[in-house]
Amino acid sequence: MTPDLGKYAFAVLGSYVVSLVLIAAVIVLSLVRSRRVRAELKRIEERLRNG
Amino acid sequence: MGPEASLLSRIAPGVLWIGALLACLLSLDRIFALDWEDGSLDLLATAPRLAVRAGGGFGLGLAFFLIVTVLVPFGVGPEASLLSRIAPGVLWIGALLACLLSLDRIFALDWEDGSLDLLATAPLPMEGIVTIKALAHWITTGLPLVLAAPLLGVLLNLPQAGYLWVLVSLALGTPALSVIGTFGAALTVGLKRGGLLLSLLVLPLYVPTLIFGAEVARRGAEGLTVQTPLLMLAGISAGTIALLPFASAAVLRINLR
Amino acid sequence: MSIWEYANPVKFIRATDRVLPWVSALALVCLVTGLIWGFFFTPEDYRQGSTVKIIYLHVPSALMAINAWIMMLVASLIWIVRRHHVSALAARAAAPVGTVFTLIALATGALWGQPMWGTWWAWDPRLTSFLILFLFYLGYMALWAAIENDDTAADLTSILCLVGSVFALLSRYAVNFWNQGLHQGASLSLDAEENVADVFWYPLLVCIAGFVALFIALVFLRTQTEIRARRARALLARERRA
């Protein structure tokens, strides 16, 4: 199943690993920040409404 | 295509750049003529005094240029042939860094004592103010660097043919460095620790000027033809002098809001 | 009904909330399909061997690194002309994504260059241009981060984006002039598809679609975040004044 990458295995696998890690990082960071900001805004809005 | 057409196409770029340069020179001339009465020349005249008051306009930049030039042989070794090969590039980088270090002083004093707000309400348009500030920066920093470069070339074993072209390329390129730097200084004028940010913003903008300027000096030093990079360098200088003050003025207006 | 309706932050959030799952799913499907297709089911190139598989990451990321900057330029222009806050915030949201794509293009380029050109880094014009683009992204984000007032930051960064675009273009030509370079122009660029055999071309197209969808999804998500963060700041400021 896995293709025989020959002597270029490091270059090819390295590219895929580096790229996927970077893409995953930017997605995760965006999601985490989105969630945090969303929660904070909700908290502020509720406090303003009640208080 | 007759011979006339090919001749025309050969000289066309040169004519265009010369035209742009002349247009620039003429418009600079008009700034002085129109604003003689409302004191913009005073603005220019105070620049050297301000530079000295802010801690050595002429001196500090020149000293920095000297130190960079002295440090390079320590870094790469004293071999004469190597030094003479890299001399034009080193001189350009040294001049560029010396220029960069003095940028934050362009507006700093005027910002701190509030005279920038006064200038903003003056009859002189903001575009004129930033042009004069850039010119003042060039006179206090760029011009001394241009004049010092051939002297420092001796330390780096610059080839005979290189002296003229280092001088010419720096004389043509440093105005662009000052104008681009004024844009960066206007962007970061109100920030407390703007120095590092200013470098980060300005250095990428310096890339085309550096490439063509250093290429003129390098080719000149090797005795090659310098026409193409020289025209490009002149074009970049003319274009930035003509257009970038509008951006700098817009940025300064936003920062003074 | 015009496109400017979505300049209203509330409408923008409502609309993108509806679209976001679909775009994200599209990005996921395209990326997984394209990369698996490219990695497992394409032959080796007779000249480049298995390194040709890097193309499925290198070309889409390089393409989107430039397109992200162009999108920021357009958004900055819209902000300057029409003063829609969502536009300025979208430009801000796109910058980190573009930076990551630039980094991917640079990293895969270095990894590809090592076996093909015998060196990790060459001052090849295209590599150099991407490095300069990376510096522009850094400066742009640093300026956003440095300024406290939101409107001032939006104004200054949009002008920097405009001026930076001109200088980035100038640098591109300066760098071309300065060094001839190793990139084999046609076989790697998109405008010369006849040079890329169909077996490589179709999975590459799927990957490009995946990167485009990923970019759109991330920009929508991050713009929503910026809008909410800004609203939170505004509410806090109002509370302090009251």
Image (cartoon, rainbow, N blue to C red):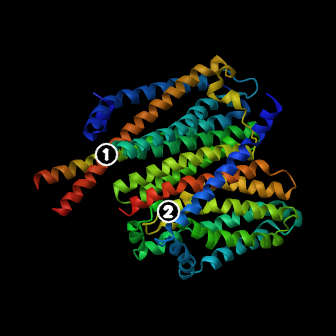
Task: Left or right? Give the position of A51 relative to B237.
Answer: left
Q: Position of residue B24 (x, y in %)?
A: 61, 56
Task: Left or right? Give the position of C164 relative to C143.
Answer: right
- Badge 1 crowding class, 10 Å Cα cut-off, few under 14, some 14 to 19, many 20 or more, is many
Q: Position of residue B200 (x, y in %)?
A: 55, 59
Question: Is residue C120 visible in the rendered structure shown here?
Answer: no
Q: Quadrant of residue C63?
A: top right
Residue drawn at (54%, 63%) of the image: B31
Mark 1 is on which residue type? Answer: Ile
Mark 2 is on which residue type? Answer: Gly
Q: Point out which mark residue C210 bears.
A: none
- Name the foreground residue: B68 vs A23: B68
Which residue, given by chain and number where applicable, does mark 2 sit on? B128
Q: Is residue C203 above or below residue B163?
A: above
Q: Is residue B67 above or below residue C197?
A: below
Label 2 resides on the chain identified as B
Task: Left or right? Give the position of B179 relative to B89.
Answer: left
Q: Quadrant of the C terminus of chain A?
A: bottom left
Q: Point out which mark residue C227 bears.
A: 1
- Name the foreground residue: B37 vs B121: B37
Secondary structure of residue under mark 1 = helix
Q: CA distance from mark 1 to mark 2?
A: 37 Å
